[in-house]
Image (cartoon, helix red, strand yellow):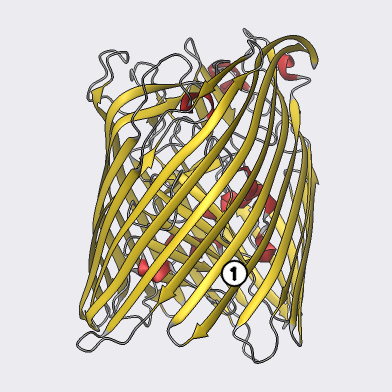
Amino acid sequence: MTPRHLFTPLALALASLSPTAHAADTVFELGRIDISGARSDARTVLTSVDVVGGDRLQDASVLETWGLMRRVPGIQLTEFNQGTTSGKLSMRGFNGEGEVNAVKLLIDGIPSNSNDGNMPWIDAIWPLEIGRLTTVRGTNDPRFGQHQIAGHVEIDTRPGGNYLSHRIGADTLGQRDVQIAWGRDSGDWRSQLFVGWRAGQGQRDHSASQRQVVAGQLFYQPEGRDWRIGVTARQHEADAQEPGYLTLAQSRQDPEQSPAHVATDGGTRTLRQFSLRADGQPAAGLDWQLLAWRNEFDDARFVTFSAAVSQQERDTQETHHGLRASLRWSPAISGLHRLQLEAGGDIELQDDASLRYLTRERARQSTTRDQAWTQRTRGLYLQALVEPTPTLRLVPALRVDRLAGGFSNQLTGKDYLINDYGTISQPKLSAVWTPLAGHSLYANWGRSFQVGVGAAMFKISRVDDLAPSINTGWEAGWKFALPAVNGRLALWQQTATNEVMRKLNDPSNDSENIGATRRRGVDLQLRGALAARVEGWLGLSRQQAIIVTPDSSSGAVAGNELDHVPRWLYSAGADWQAADTLQLSAWLQGQSSYELNRANSAGRFGAYALLNLAARWQVAPQWTLSAELKNLADRYSEYVWFDGTQSLHAPGAGRSLALSLQSHF
């Protein structure tokens, strides 16, 4: 029996540099990509698209699911390390601070962003149940609207089959986890179940946490029929302490400490997600999809940002209902190699509430926010895929969105109307040309949009309507497969009008206009054989994010860098297949420093370079034993922010060893 290829975390760095069988697309794949029972649309999005197969993800040693993105080229992770608020991914020169949340998250096609654009539902899907992970960068995908400012991430669960998998893991930081995934196909029915539990103290003081998740799916497709229906459900519970932020001096003296003023900080979070879906192919070249969903988010957090401020209680309750439908037709047209027409639409209704209190050791002292609002978002899109020849593909598209809703400030008893943003039009155009086998040249141009979130969507402090911020982006790239190396080189730029940033610690839940911005960069990925049974890789991203024309209220910041955007993101390493059942790996990952504020006056922090080792030993055909030695040199890393008077630091993990045992039956 040939052993299955063992997972290594190195593989994520170039998640998809292997050339595909499609002559004219820009998708790169890694691992086994099984899309049975689901329609794959990624190949029609002609931009930097990476697809990672589940076999490369399911035995990953990560504490949070967003950690799977750690080595995907061009993806930046912001690691708060604060209980249920642990971290977030971002891309294309947008940071993960929460001021502008520019990445849309989809779990099995369900929009999974909270109202402010954060992605708490990513915590509710764990590695062992993932079938594939797709990253789409840029502004040219018409399928999704709000929050897809710079791109989106799709996480799809296993597509089906008969299996029983489990993973038991522990590390020297004190974390333990158990994951069990089960699937069965029987006649007309397909069912899946996942259960996960994770708990531990953590490296820093006052960082104990416990999380559990349960998820299930049930699909019905009558034999010989061209349609199916299904339901999915998911619930995640978390209870965690927060170790807090340290001053610069504290972080250098003892990075594992937790300051006394956060002794009662922590929070609980409940996430629920339900869906009803159907799809079918009533005729050759014609298929349709229908998805209805409900998301529930209930979060309670006690947080004290520094010794100089009071503890806050932050409560958030959100319920989202949505419906999406799409129809795709592929007629045979004489003179064209291929033509595909697609139309779709979606509507989402939100009922949201945000409350804040000043507290002392979790006892409420006063109320600073009591807000409730509704939001309705409607979107339509049209897209054509035209292939005049097998080597040339053109994709024009158009999306339009409209927003409606109402806001109530329950502290004052006043109600407000939403800004009339009008019909937000987003044209897009993409092309790819494959002049030689293994070489694709592609380019795209498109627009996405941003509007205020929370109270900033409504006419509270003004009578005039605000215009949406329009993001215009382009990309030009080359995907190549040479005899000795595969790779991708991409140049990109994205500009925004009147960009809006949330005021994170403002009780009003408002935003501010910072003006026109420009983000640009270059991404390079290389992968090839260094020797027999040794493969090396390199991922390098250079990016810049600046304020071009500041708003009149922003001060003299023209030409300044936007905060928390490192200029460099990099990763490199090698995999050695030492034996048929043993793989050894080493990899380096890091980033450069970033500014802490838009005035560029608080210093630069956040640079790190971490070296890691891993081993995967297939002890039997269905059993794999894994070890990962993270941060081998015990180098210091941190997330840093500026509160207006001082820098505040959240140290990252030091050296640690993670062990896991995984089975596949």
Residue closer to the observer: 460 or 13: 460
Q: Position of residue 139 (x, y in %)?
A: 33, 51
Q: Point out the image quarter for the N terminus.
A: bottom right
* Left or right: 211 in relation to 587: right
Three-letter amino acid code of the residue under disc 1: Gly
Compared to residue 12, the image places residue 361 above or below, namely above
Residue 351: image location, x then y, percent: 64, 36
Q: Where 186 sits versus 80, above or below?
A: below
Image quarter (top left, top right, bottom left or bottom right) of the C terminus: bottom right
* Residue plotted at (28% across, 80% down): 483
Q: Nearer the viewer, residue 137 or 117?
A: 117
Q: What secondary structure is found at the residue carrying circle 1?
A: helix
Residue depicted at x 56% and y 78%: 280
Residue 632 coordinates in the image, percent (x, y) = 57, 48
| Position of residue 318 in the picture relative to residue 472 (left or right) | right
Q: Position of residue 441 (x, y in %)?
A: 21, 68
Please tell me whether residue 67 is drawn above or below residue 289 in the rendered image.
Answer: above
Q: Quadrant of residue 220?
A: bottom right
